[in-house]
Image (spheres, coloured by chain):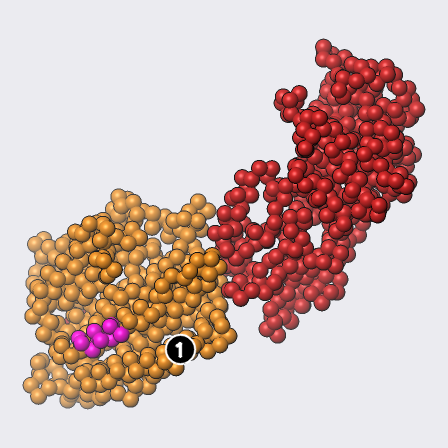
């Protein structure tokens, strides 16, 4: 029996040899591809137990990691809370990361190549590796004013420094507390996430950057810019301003807001001041779809951005037929802007026609506070000539002085602005309009440009106008920065 | 092979070696235990002294029993089993800690810890080990129980299939007997009983199975009526597979039977017939048995996004753990083996791969190989055919179980539901493996005992003695 028994022994040896070779294959040969598999949560778990760097605003943390006693050594907390949620995003064990947490993950996690030597020395000395910090451009007063202004309504506010593009405020409402998604309790995270996904008003959506809305009369800034740039119009050019305008090639009549008359004929400046639809539809038709589309493009409409959060592209339909051209000129038809794009249009006029690239990160720092990178403001494009910018500024000042935007007046400071009251939806007569306001101040030497959007008229519903609902919010944000 | 399967010359007792190795196994266990505690709390384990003394006492008691009851037995088998059992206890304790942490993080109270119960099973296992050595003073006595063993083995095997599902099914596998709070897997004991039966039966029938037959293409094919036993074993395996959804045991029984048949007869045609039946059975199972087909698909595509969050989640997470462990592992208590479902039973090998690394997994496999080779060596040296067959069946069955189990977890072969001897959590498995070890030690003792005054097979041993 010994000969077959020896064969069986050899078979047993071969089985073990196969096991040994196979475990070498799994743990060495295939190891790196298995570790990189997106379903391998171990990577996230180990990342989660490093000391992640903070996100700071004006010297205060809006997101930071605090030491805990459980197996994940640090808990991510958000002292900035819901007000800063669209910017910080969340950093969650279960559902991943969003916002700056995602966009600047390499710096925060300490895996950025600029932090390589720091990380190496941590590994060697056995210290817990630490991430770098991200310092935001946000102005805490402006951010708080913006978030407070949106209390109880659905909407968004964006404020920019017109000369640099630095984002001073970026708020959305309703919002959520990112801390609830960053706990170490995965069941609770799943529950909260599910609730937020189905909550009224979609609190997880950043309306300021990822949603586009019909701009309504706000778009008259673009139409006026195109008109002045064409050389055919100045603020003092007298244009027809009928009570109703028959759209070309159709039997459809365009009315003014509330069916009002604009006096039959008036100057461009006055038509802008009182936001006369028939006058601006006529101007749009005279300027033509090509010049309107070119002007929209020059303001950045149609381009997507990263700030470093991804920003949805705003829209303008450059193939509109004449009746739709008339509607496009007053911000209807296919026009759709993100609140950030609206703020960029205001900031561009404020900055003498030069559009600066908006940005959220002022600088990134290593754990020892040495600067890793500093934001370099840069020009995106020139939208209008300085002369046209001056003319548009002038007519925007009239809006706040004695037009539809008087609610944005600040004593002692000249404010330039434009209202928008955008009808939308399929049964547009019945849905309350979106209320818009874009402004900058001080008008001659602007330090802040702001855009406010309130969905469906906010608390005023179908009685809402941009001037009544959105302008006061814009005013309080400007006041927070300018001091009033 | 000779390096790991070279016991000392016959007639020599090596108690000192065994005691040293037993103490080494105890120290190894306590080092692992301390390492887990250090990773979790940066402190020595609270009960290190009591647990250490308790475990050492248990191990030394087993050693004393062997010294007294099987003085000539191989000195490596017991220490190897104690090392595996000890490391298993530490790993189960380590997974208990992870479960507690997770429960606290989820705001729930922690479930019952498994390690204290496994320690109780260890005590019972070692008592059973000593009990077998006491009761069975000569393994040849088992030969008279051949048909009793068959009846007991078959009854235990089919018991879960006969019981209502509520008393036999846990996690989809119908391999349990459950009454009240008590549950055990009769298949583990059935395996031992059937090995006794196979050995006794084949010793009696080996001549007819080996000699009768016709020569075809260089192979001596058995007569059709002699095919009965192998076909019966095959049918029984398929029955276990389909009725109890127990792929692992099915494979194990058939493999052990064919190996023992080959050892008994020395006829390669049995291997060929076994292989043909195995291949046919495998294809049929993949084709007609849904859960076998699923296992095969998981084996082929464990990282398929469609199944990675459900059917193949366990295997994929186990592989991720092993990959994370790499060559040297994360260190005990510093990986996340708890992310793998059933990490302390089915997937304890991936826990080893993750925290002790490739190095640790290879070391554990080497300990298993040591037991297998020493067991086969005892089988070769023992003086009676029954002992040889039984020892070979026990040792090869042990090897096959480790191969099927670890091979499934490391994706060498499709996953089956076997336990890893001495390491996996579970009383039935632990107790039956301690009994298996006692039988191997008994055979080894007989193999290396000085030739009796009236040797059972005088010619053979006399020849050996005079040669020296």
Q: Quadrant of residue A211?
A: top right
Point out residue A344 in the picture as x, y percentages from the top left corner: 78, 39
Q: Quadrant of residue A322?
A: top right
The chain identifier of the residue carrying mark 1 reads B
| Residue at the top extreme of this rendering | A251
Tag 1: Cα neighbours inside 10 Å, few (<14), some, or many (≥20)?
A: few
The chain letter corresponding to red is A
Please say whether residue B245 is visible from this viewpoint.
yes
The N terminus of chain A - image quarter: bottom left
The residue that label 1 is drawn on is B47
Q: Is residue A262 above or below residue B468?
A: above
Point out residue A89 in the picture as x, y percentages from the top left corner: 63, 49
Q: Nearer the viewer, residue A354 or A98?
A: A98
Q: Residue at x 24, y 72 (%)?
A: B124
**A465 left or right of B360 in image:** right
The color chain B is rendered in: orange
Q: Per the image, is B419 magenta? A: no
Please say whether residue A111 is visible from this viewpoint.
no
Q: Nearer the viewer, residue B267 or A295?
A: A295
Residue range of the region highlighted in magenta in the rendering? B123-132
Q: Nearer the viewer, residue B239 or A390?
A: A390
Point out residue B421 in the picture as x, y percentages from the top left corner: 29, 67
Q: Secondary structure at mark 1?
A: loop
Q: Is residue A292 above or below residue A339?
A: above
**A232 left or right of A460 in image:** right
* Count of all numbered marks drawn on residues in the image: 1
């Amino acid at each position: 029996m010994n000969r077959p028994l020896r064969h069986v022994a050899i078979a047993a040896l071969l089985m073990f040899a196969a096991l040994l070779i196979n475990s070498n294959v799994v743990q060495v040969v295939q190891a790196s591809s298995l570790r990189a598999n997106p379903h391998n949560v171990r990577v996230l778990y180990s990342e989660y137990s490093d000391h992640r760097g903070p996100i700071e605003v004006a010297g205060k943390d809006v997101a930071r990691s605090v030491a805990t006693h459980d197996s994940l050594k640090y808990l991510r907390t958000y002292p900035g809370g819901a007000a800063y949620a669209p910017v910080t995003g969340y950093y969650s064990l279960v559902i991943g990361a969003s916002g700056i947490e995602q966009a600047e993950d390499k710096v925060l996690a300490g895996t950025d190549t600029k932090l390589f030597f720091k990380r190496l020395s941590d590994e060697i000395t056995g210290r817990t590796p630490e991430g770098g910090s991200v310092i935001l451009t946000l102005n805490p007063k402006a951010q708080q004013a913006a978030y407070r202004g949106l209390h109880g309504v659905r909407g968004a506010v964006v404020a920019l420094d017109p000369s640099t593009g630095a984002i001073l405020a970026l708020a959305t409402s309703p919002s959520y507390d990112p801390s609830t998604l960053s706990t170490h309790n995965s069941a609770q995270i799943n529950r909260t996430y599910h609730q937020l996904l189905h909550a009224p008003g979609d609190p997880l959506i950043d309306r300021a950057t990822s949603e586009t809305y019909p701009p309504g009369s706000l778009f008259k800034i673009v139409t006026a810019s195109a008109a002045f740039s064409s050389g055919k119009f100045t603020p003092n050019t007298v244009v027809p301003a009928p009570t109703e305008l028959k759209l070309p090639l159709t039997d459809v009549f365009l009315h003014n807001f509330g069916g009002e008359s604009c006096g039959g004929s008036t100057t461009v400046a006055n038509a802008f001041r009182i936001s006369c639809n028939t006058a601006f539809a006529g101007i749009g038709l005279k300027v033509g779809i090509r010049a309107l589309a070119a002007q929209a493009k020059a303001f950045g409409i149609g381009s997507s951005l990263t700030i470093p959060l991804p920003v949805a592209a705003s829209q303008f339909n450059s193939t509109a037929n004449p009746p739709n051209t008339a509607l496009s000129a007053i911000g209807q038809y296919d026009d759709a802007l993100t609140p950030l794009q609206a703020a960029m249009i205001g900031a561009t006029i404020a900055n003498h026609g030069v559009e600066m690239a908006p940005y959220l990160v002022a600088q990134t720092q290593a754990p020892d506070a040495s600067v890793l990178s500093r934001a370099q403001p840069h020009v995106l494009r020139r939208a209008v000539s300085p002369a046209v910018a001056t003319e548009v500024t002038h007519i925007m000042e009239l809006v706040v002085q004695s037009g539809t935007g008087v609610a944005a007046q600040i004593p002692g400071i000249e404010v330039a602005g434009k209202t928008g009251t955008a009808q939308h939806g399929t049964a547009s007569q019945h849905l309350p309009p979106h209320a818009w306001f874009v402004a900058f101040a001080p008008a001659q030497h602007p330090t802040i440009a702001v855009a406010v959007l309130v969905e469906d008229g906010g608390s005023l519903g179908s009685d809402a106008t941009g001037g009544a609902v959105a302008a006061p919010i814009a005013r309080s944000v400007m006041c927070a920065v300018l001091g009033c | 092979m000779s390096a790991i399967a070279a016991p000392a010359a016959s007639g020599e007792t090596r108690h000192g070696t065994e005691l040293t190795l037993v103490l080494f196994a105890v120290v190894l266990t306590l080092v692992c235990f301390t390492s887990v505690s250090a990773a979790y709390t940066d402190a020595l384990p609270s009960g290190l002294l009591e647990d250490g003394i308790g475990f050492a006492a248990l191990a030394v008691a087993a050693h004393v029993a062997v010294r007294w009851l099987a003085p000539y037995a191989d000195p490596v088998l017991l220490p190897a089993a104690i090392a595996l059992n000890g490391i298993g206890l530490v790993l189960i304790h380590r997974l208990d800690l992870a479960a507690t942490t997770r429960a606290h993080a989820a705001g729930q109270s922690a479930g019952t810890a498994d390690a204290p119960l496994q320690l109780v099973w260890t005590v019972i296992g070692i008592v059973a080990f000593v009990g077998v050595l006491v009761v069975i003073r000569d393994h040849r006595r088992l030969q008279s129980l051949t048909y009793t063993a068959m009846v007991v083995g078959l009854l235990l095997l089919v018991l879960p299939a006969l019981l209502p599902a509520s008393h036999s099914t846990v996690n989809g596998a119908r391999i349990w007997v459950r009454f009240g709070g008590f549950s055990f897997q009769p298949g583990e004991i059935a395996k031992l009983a059937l090995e006794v039966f196979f050995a006794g039966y084949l010793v009696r029938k080996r001549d007819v199975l080996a000699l009768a037959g016709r020569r075809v293409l260089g192979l001596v094919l058995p007569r059709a009526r002699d095919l009965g036993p192998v076909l019966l074993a095959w049918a029984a395996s398929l029955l276990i597979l389909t009725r109890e959804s127990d792929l692992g045991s099915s494979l194990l029984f058939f493999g052990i039977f064919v190996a023992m048949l080959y050892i008994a007869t020395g006829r390669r045609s049995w291997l060929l017939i076994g292989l043909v039946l195995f291949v046919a059975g495998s294809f049929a199972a993949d084709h007609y048995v849904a859960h076998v087909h699923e296992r095969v698909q998981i084996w082929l595509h464990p990282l398929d996004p469609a199944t990675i969050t459900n059917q193949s989640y366990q295997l994929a997470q186990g592989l991720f753990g092993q990959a994370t462990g790499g060559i040297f592992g994360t260190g005990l208590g510093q990986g996340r083996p708890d992310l793998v479902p059933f990490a302390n039973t089915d997937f304890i090998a991936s826990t080893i791969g993750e925290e002790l690394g490739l190095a640790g997994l290879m070391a554990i496999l080497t300990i298993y190989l040591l037991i297998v080779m020493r067991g086969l060596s005892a089988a070769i040296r023992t003086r009676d055919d029954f002992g040889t067959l039984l020892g070979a069946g026990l040792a090869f069955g042990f090897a096959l179980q480790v191969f099927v189990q670890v091979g499934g977890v490391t994706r060498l072969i499709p996953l089956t539901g076997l336990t890893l001897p001495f390491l996996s959590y579970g009383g039935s498995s632990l107790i039956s493996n301690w009994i298996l070890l006692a039988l191997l030690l008994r055979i080894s003792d007989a193999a290396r005992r000085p030739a009796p005054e009236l040797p059972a097979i005088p010619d053979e041993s006399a020849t050996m003695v005079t040669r020296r």
